[in-house]
Image: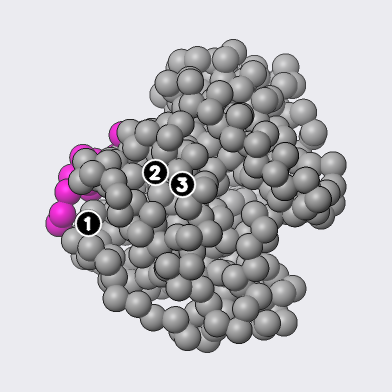
Amino acid sequence: MNARRGTFPDLYVDETWLAQRTEEALDPQLPIVDPHHHLWRRATPYFVPELLADLSCGHHIRGTVYMECSNMYRADGDPRFASVGEVEYVNGIGAEFASGCHGAVRACAGVVGHVDLMQGDAAREVMDAMLLRAPDRLRGIRHMAAWDASPAINVLKRPPPPHLLLHPQFRQGFSHLRDLNLSFDAWVYHPQLPQLIDLIDAFPDTVVVIDHVGGLVVTGPYAEHQKEAVSQWTRSMREIARRPNVMVKIGGLNSRLHGFDFMDRALPPSSEQLAQAWRPYFDTCIEAFGSRRAMFESNFPVDKCGCSANVLWNAFKRLAAGCSEDEKADLFAGTAVRTYRLPDALRRPA
């Protein structure tokens, strides 16, 4: 195991290790819209050059949606508006790609920004400021709610309050999303899914996207009760799927929280190994939500700690091998285009 990969399991990308596994792209003409990636300066920086390399991995990636990650915040001015800086920055990246200078791909065609919804009604001012600076690309808001009592599970440097989704102030801020036609990306751990259901039921007209298959955790205190954890996750996901305003992202599965150790092996995994390991997650999500409300996500560069872009999309294509052509079109591009209101041309071959 590479020591740095062990120290920074969700941040450090070992390109030398990844290069040991190469594959031919499966179904290379299938249009892909990646609805979840980041740009940042962390243990391994990931900016336009790194993104371009992964977009050129042999798969037909037509566009992407940027997901907030506390990057490029404003250093000056009212701290309530610091996160507007991230949207400004990414909107510029989207404009760069829209110019055609990188070819036909349209990275950052959609943007999901961060707003502290605990500001209550004052959160509306921040949303308005973001829309003013990125009216053609801002499509949603994420306020990460992932919290667990165990420090072995919490991966956020500043974990949120344990019952964030139930807090009246949070819900007051959340209430402004629908009026602005903004969706909400929800990142939680699976024990929090009942709280998410309660939130969704309080706002049935707001589009909610569940990140990373609902955050099933089978490590730490859940390791001795994995079957119970999976059963709880399955019940909650099936219950959430009964709400037609909810979508799910299939991805974010390279984290050790899900019980996989691929990043610790001498060789990176093949797409066959990943597809086999991820099959239960995929089958449960598709059975519950159907392809019209599910989408594959890269979660790069976080998930790049465990596999290359080429292998990742091959794994997803292996998972979808038994789906119809229409279902594949939804999973790889259509659902993302509809959910984030992206240009319809992105779901078609260039």
Q: Is residue 313 found left or right of 169 in the rendered image?
A: left
Instruction: Please give the residue where the numbered disc 3 appears in the rendered image.
Output: 282
Q: What is the secondary structure assignment of the residue under circle 2?
A: strand
> Is 278 placed left or right of 164 in the picture?
left
Q: Is residue 333 visible?
A: no
- The one nearer the camera, 32 or 140, is 32
Return the x and y of residue 106 as percentages of the image width and height: 28, 55
Furthest-left residue in view? 350
Mark linked to residue 30: 1
Magenta residue span: 338-350
- Name the N-terminal-most of marks 1 and 2: 1
Side of 172 where 322 appears, left or right = left
Above or below for 165 versus 138? above
- Which label number is shown at residue 295? 2
Q: Which disc number belongs to residue 310?
A: none
In space, the residues marked 1 and 3 are separated at their CA atoms by 19 Å
Q: Where is the C terminus found, in terms of image quarters?
A: bottom left
Is mark 1 in CB contact (under 8 Å) with mark 3? no
- Identify whether 143 is placed above or below 62: above
Q: Residue furthest front?
A: 227
